[in-house]
Image: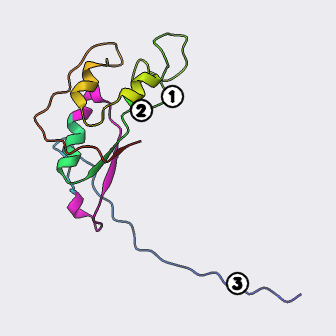
Amino acid sequence: SPAREDKTIQIRFPAPTRLPLPCKAGIQRTAADFATDTVRVNFWDTQYWGGFDSAKDWAAKGFEVILSNPDYLYLDMPYEVNPAERGYYWATRYSDEAKVFSFAPNNWPQNAETSVDRDGNFFTAKSDKPWPGATGIS
């Protein structure tokens, strides 16, 4: 049989541009720095560690924010507060259907009033920063 001709095409892409990571002083990039009209960020900080304020910082920079708060939306957390219950405890003490479906992405203070942190302590989610609302939840 005749030898097969190699028809491999080699494509060279320019080296990717690396954006600096956010530093403690704040977010270094805004949505306007990107070449697309819409830039979304998937935000997955816990609300009780200040996530309500951080998400507002991202929105203030022009990013559309998709909330993935692990203390409300992760389904691999324990279903109830019991040491024998399977699941990860790094984000919340428990996460059941009532908690997941009562999550109010555009009313952070309400979430704080109806929940506790991973140690069982109450917390507040008050901020003077504007919140345009979440683009979605994930």
For this rendering, which residue is in front, 58 or 12?
58
Residue 15 appears at what percent x and percent y? Answer: 39, 69
Amino acid type, mark 3 = Asp
Bounds of the magenta segment: 31-52
Residue 78 appears at what percent x and percent y? Answer: 49, 20
Q: Residue at x 46, y 24 (%)?
A: 97
User: Is residue 58 on the magenta stretch?
Assistant: no
The local secondary structure at tag 2 comes to helix
Amino acid type, mark 2 = Leu
Does residue 77 appear left or right of residue 21 in this picture?
A: right
**Can you name the residue that lies furthest to the left here?**
128
Q: Nearer the viewer, mark 2 or mark 1?
A: 2
Amino acid type, mark 1 = Asp
Q: Nearer the viewer, mark 1 or mark 3?
A: 1
How crowded pointer 2 is (Cα within 10 Å; few <14, some 14-19, many 20+) is rated as many
Q: Which residue is mark 2?
A: 73
Q: Residue at x 23, y 47 (%)?
A: 58
Quadrant the N terminus occupies: bottom right
Query: Which picture quadrant has residue 132?
Result: top left
Q: Which residue is mark 1?
A: 76
Q: Which residue is mark 3?
A: 6
Query: From the viewer's perspective, is residue 50 above or below residue 93?
Result: below
